[in-house]
Amino acid sequence: MGKKTSDTIQNEEKIPFNEIDDELDNWREQSPKLCTQLPFDIYPWIILGCICFLTFGSYWVYDTPGAIQTQLTGYFDNFTSFGNYTNFDNSLLYSVYSVPNVILAFFGGYIVDRFTGVRVGSLLFCGLVFIGQFIFSLGIQFEYYWVCVFGRFVFGLGGESLTVSQSTFTARWFDGSLLALAFGITVSFSRIGSSINFIVTPTLAGNDGNDYGTTVPRAVWFGTLMTVVSLAATLIAGGLDYFGRAKIAKKINAQKSSADAQKPSIFHVKYFPLPAWINMLCCMFFYIAVLVFYQVASGIIQFTGDPKHRKNAKVASYYISIPNIVAIFASPLFGFIIDRYGKALYYILVASLALTLGHVGFFGNSVQWWYIPPAILMVWIGISYSMGAAAMWPILANVVHTKLLATGYGTMTSLQNFGLAIFPLFTGLLQTYFAKTYPPPAGDPQERILTFDETLQWNVTTIVFIGCAFIAAGLAILNIILDKAKTEGRLNASKSQRDLLPPLPDPLLRKKSKIDPEIYNEGEYEEEDDMDDEYYKPADPWAFEEVEVSRRLNRTPHNVRMNYLSRLGIGPNIGR
């Protein structure tokens, strides 16, 4: 009694094992919390260690002109035939790096998506970083400023595209609850290079003006050695990715173009939702208020405020390293918190407002309204920078399909470099203009109180940074409003909340029927012909039809699991 007869068993529909396995795999993908987790895999973390070093060298040498501006001024003024080395000349070394990246950073992502792949692309861009820095070092060694400018230009051809490759590499091996943490680790480790540069490079360059002829080239060549370290890490990361590609086979296959999809194109940026573009603009203004500030922070600390609180060039460089040192520890922490609890846009808002207050603090020091130790202000800016960076970069993957992710990061980096190309020249021109219009009288400006007019070259630039940080805060508020209406709240969602949302629509699919091929499931339609084999590219991939939304919602982890259990003959009440 209670047992089935053999005739009953024979008459029951037999379920092919391959169908059961497919359904079980689908269930595991849709609801990882309801099934047994795989054991901890150390392999992705080994690759992450190499990924961290991809941009170590480029971050090191990027800030070299800012770290030793005083020493470079003395070197070109006294040991070369170049003549007067101005703030504009130093800013130009930053701008020529960023100018090509307004376009190339975008095409770097497109090249990785369409042609080279992440392994070859990373090696290509890292090689350009090394070649550019090598040329820059030759320019310093043989006292040719314009060779230095050309070297920085070549360096820029690979620098930001390498950052795009690093982001794509990270998203390739990490997703879900670990993505923001992995991004935080890569961002923080990359900034180690910049932090150590602000400490080591000024030390190697020294403070004795009589020795700049030998110490400045020595400091620059040491940076070239750091780019060799990154080149070696790129080779190792590429090898590990190749031999471990079976571990991420599903993600690799998802990124490859299938028969019913188009290959990525530069024109597909039009499918990025509006909140993604606003996040990119917010990132641009936020990074202007941080990275361009580093270029003038040494002068602010050396020449403004009460003379008894001013520092020399070497100590000022140490202060500039503080935000990046803070980011080493704070970025992974914020990445973990944001990924677990969501609310990334609120973190961006708080970070932008906090960054605004940090620059207000420096402005108050400069005009002697108050005195806040620069170390405290730099720690504050470091926390703000870590919070903003940990929130801005990972959330792009929440609203841009994986097939266009490298293109998305390339576009984001291009807009960032648009700002970083214009604003160093703008601030450099402001400084040069006010320095010529209100030059300090003879004597050491560090040993007396400068008038308001004499400090305008630093005060005006500080006001520019205050404005940029405030604009970033305004864009964050706008995104908070638009996120729910345009992207289903994905930017602000936590990992658990994103699991309940429908998958991102594939902008490269073409369809004719209203049935979404990604959600088509055998049994939902009476005839297989209901599914049209041809597709059209939707005008707006975010414009879901109600019927499509309902079908997507029916594919919840619970419903998939119950469908699987029912096919095994298990009652519907099991597992609720």
Image (cartoon, helix red, strand yellow):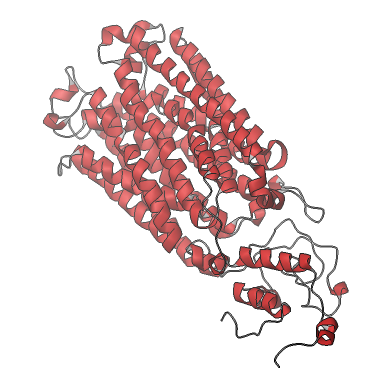
Give coordinates of residue 246: x percent, y percent.
67, 45
**Quadrant position of the N terminus in the picture:** bottom right
Examine the image and state in which quarter residue 406 appears.
top right
Can residue 439 be seen in this snapshot?
no
- In this rendering, the answer to whether 508 lies above or below 209 is below
Q: Is residue 253 above or below residue 428?
A: below
Which residue is pictured at 85% across the width and 84% down the height? Answer: 11
Task: Look at the image and tell me whether residue 12 can be seen.
Answer: yes
Residue 363 percent across, percent down from the top left: 24, 42
Judge from the rendering whether residue 280 lies leftward or rightward of residue 563; answer left or right. left
From this viewpoint, which residue is outermost toward the front?
Answer: 1
Report the side of 24 relative to 227 (left or right). Answer: right
Q: Nearer the viewer, residue 282 or 11?
A: 11
Q: Is residue 519 left or right of residue 84?
A: right
Q: Residue at x 35, y 7 (%)?
A: 213
> Where's the C terminus, which quadrant?
bottom right
How many numbered marks have been drawn onto this rendered protein structure?
0
Extreme residue in the right direction: 529
Q: Quadrant of residue 575?
A: bottom right
Residue 299: % across, % down: 28, 29
Q: Is residue 88 left or right of residue 320?
A: right
Q: Vertically, is 237 above or below 442?
A: below
Whole-percent x and y of residue 347? 39, 57
Q: Quick one: 532 or 272, which is closer to the camera?
A: 532
